Image (cartoon, rainbow, N blue to C red):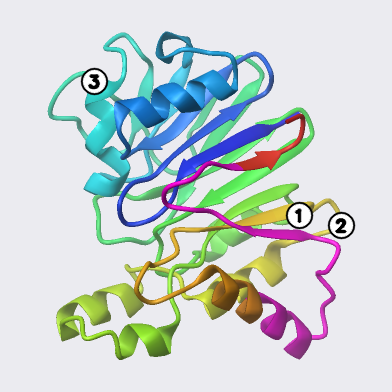
Amino acid sequence: MIKIAFLGSGSKGNATLISDGVSLILIDMGLTKARLVDGCALFAKQLKDIDAAFFTHNHNDHLSGHKYLPKELKVYASFDFKEPPSASLIKAGDNIRIGNIRVTAILASHDAPNPLSYLIQVGEERLAYITDTGYIPKKTLKAIVNCDYYLLESNHDPSLEAHSGRSATLVARVLGKKGHLSNEDSAKYFLQAHGEKTKACYLAHLSDDCNTPDLALKTYYEVANKLGVDIHDIELIPTKQNEVVFGGEGW
């Protein structure tokens, strides 16, 4: 059984804790130490009880809090850390087993060195963890078909982004193939990937300025209606920047 706590998701910081009831892993750490400590407590754990940490890429909103992690912690990333704890270098296709949790690194497309997404498996349950990617490569999409749970970036509305007043360079970056998924693209990928096992999709990394939870959800349902797909039996839950969102089962 997968239990998930999305501690924070957005441009101001990201971190997620995942457990099978025994082992505890962390994906990204761009939050304060206090928020991670509080997150561990949700699992009746402490910082020292985290069994491993995995990083998607080296941007500060996913990395800045790594200095708070225990120096002896097992850390996996596709880039070198400049300070302890040191990371074991991994690449797309690598599999790491932490207790009964299997973590597979999969391809992402972002303006960072060797960005990764992850596929997490506990028994027969699978979580696809897809964030900070301008598109989902075909190999990744094939790997995440019919997962039980999805954490899927739904960053922005393209019209709001284009009229945001941001610099042309920043807008082009966000909208580009190494930027972030829009609501519509996120929905289209989800509709291609989801299957009969799928229970929930958690919408991630929503922009404060160029998106809202209601708009992201509205877009998902509109895209589904256009394609003639009924997803009303699947939970669609936006993650939040400053509040914990619970996922999986067993809470």
Q: Which residue is mark 2?
A: 196
Label 1 or label 2, whichever comes before in sequence order: 1
Q: Residue at x 33, y 69 (%)?
A: 179
Secondary structure found at label 2: loop
Residues in magenta, as a range: 220-245
C-alpha distance separating marks 3 and 1: 34 Å
Q: Which residue is mark 1?
A: 146
Which amino acid, by three-letter code, is at mark 1?
Answer: Asn
Verify CB contact (< 8 Å) between mark 3 and mark 1. Answer: no
C-alpha distance separating marks 1 and 2: 7 Å
The answer to whether residue 20 is left or right of residue 79 is: right
Q: Is residue 92 above or below residue 235?
A: above
Secondary structure found at label 1: loop
Q: Is residue 90 above or below residue 88?
A: below
The answer to whether residue 60 is left or right of residue 4 is: left
Q: Residue at x 74, y 80 (%)?
A: 224
Which amino acid, by three-letter code, is at mark 2?
Answer: Glu
Residue nearest the observer in this picture, 52 or 3: 3
Asked if the stretch drawn in magenta spans residue 140, the answer is no
Q: Residue at x 76, y 35 (%)?
A: 249
**Crowd class of label 1 (few under 14; some 14 to 19; many from 20; radius 10 Å):** many
Residue nearest the observer in this picture, 90 or 28: 28
The image shows residue 142 at horizontal and vertical percentages of 64, 58
Label 2 or label 3, whichever comes before in sequence order: 3
The image shows residue 230 at horizontal and vertical percentages of 85, 75
C-alpha distance separating marks 2 and 3: 40 Å
Residue nearest the observer in this picture, 54 or 139: 54
The image shows residue 120 at horizontal and vertical percentages of 61, 36
